[in-house]
Amino acid sequence: MIMYADLIDTLNDLVRVNNDRAAGYDTAVRQTKDAGLQHIFQSMADQSREYAFELNRQIRDLGGEEERDTSLGGDLYRTWMDLKADFTSSDNSILSSCEYGEDVALRVYNMALSNDIEIPQPVLDLITRQQGELKLSHDRIKKHRELNKAIK
């Protein structure tokens, strides 16, 4: 399936960003004491695990191997989140970190949709749906960060 090598690489990038996102939210769950935020963070981690599963299914269907890893950048960012949490345990700081992670995920999806590779319609529909839902998640995190900041 050489003809799909670029598409498989793109889908692998999307899986990695979702693996990063899930791991980032798992970190955020551990860092906050707020049960409401823990629930939101857990649901977003689960969302990314589902997205990675859906994308990996497409990769397999195209003849590629499933992506299981996170990115080096994501690993470094989570380490920074942990260090930051050691010095400040505010939910606003955690929410800011999560919003940044959402920005990164959306950028990767935007790049996937704007590159010049041929994407079969079912795969395009999947990526577009996930991107739209990620935008809603981003806006939800941003709203919580703004509310948290206004309250504090």
Image: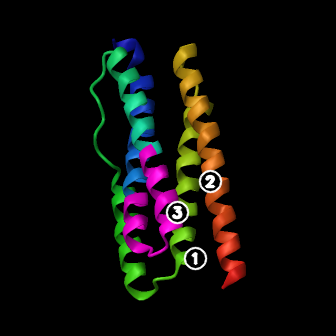
Q: Nearer the viewer, residue 45 or 109?
A: 45
In the figure, 65 relative to 104: above or below?
A: above
Label 2 crowd (10 A; few <14 / some 14-19 / many >=20): some
How far is mark 1 from mark 3, CA to CA?
10 Å
Q: Answer yes or no: do the residues labelled 1 and 3 have beta carbons within 8 Å? A: no
In the figure, 35 relative to 107: above or below?
A: below
How far is mark 1 from mark 2, CA to CA?
15 Å
Q: Nearer the viewer, residue 139 or 14?
A: 139
Label 3 crowd (10 A; few <14 / some 14-19 / many >=20): many
Q: Nearer the viewer, residue 41 or 5?
A: 41
Please report the residue visible at 49 percent of the width from the left and 51 percent of the height from the top: 44
Q: Amino acid at mark 1?
A: Asn
Residue that numbered label 1 is attached to: 92
Q: Nearer the viewer, residue 119 or 136?
A: 136
Sequence-wise first label, 1 or 3: 1
- Where residue 65 sits, quadrant-wise, is top left
Q: Amino acid at mark 3?
A: Cys
Q: How many marks?
A: 3
Q: Which mark is residue 106?
A: none
Residue that numbered label 2 is attached to: 138
* Residue 25 part of the magenta-drawn span: yes
What element does badge 3 sit on?
helix
Please report the residue visible at 59 percent of the width from the left and 44 percent of the height from the top: 134
Residue that numbered label 3 is attached to: 98
Q: Position of residue 102 (x, y in %)?
A: 56, 54
In the figure, 111 relative to 28: above or below?
A: above
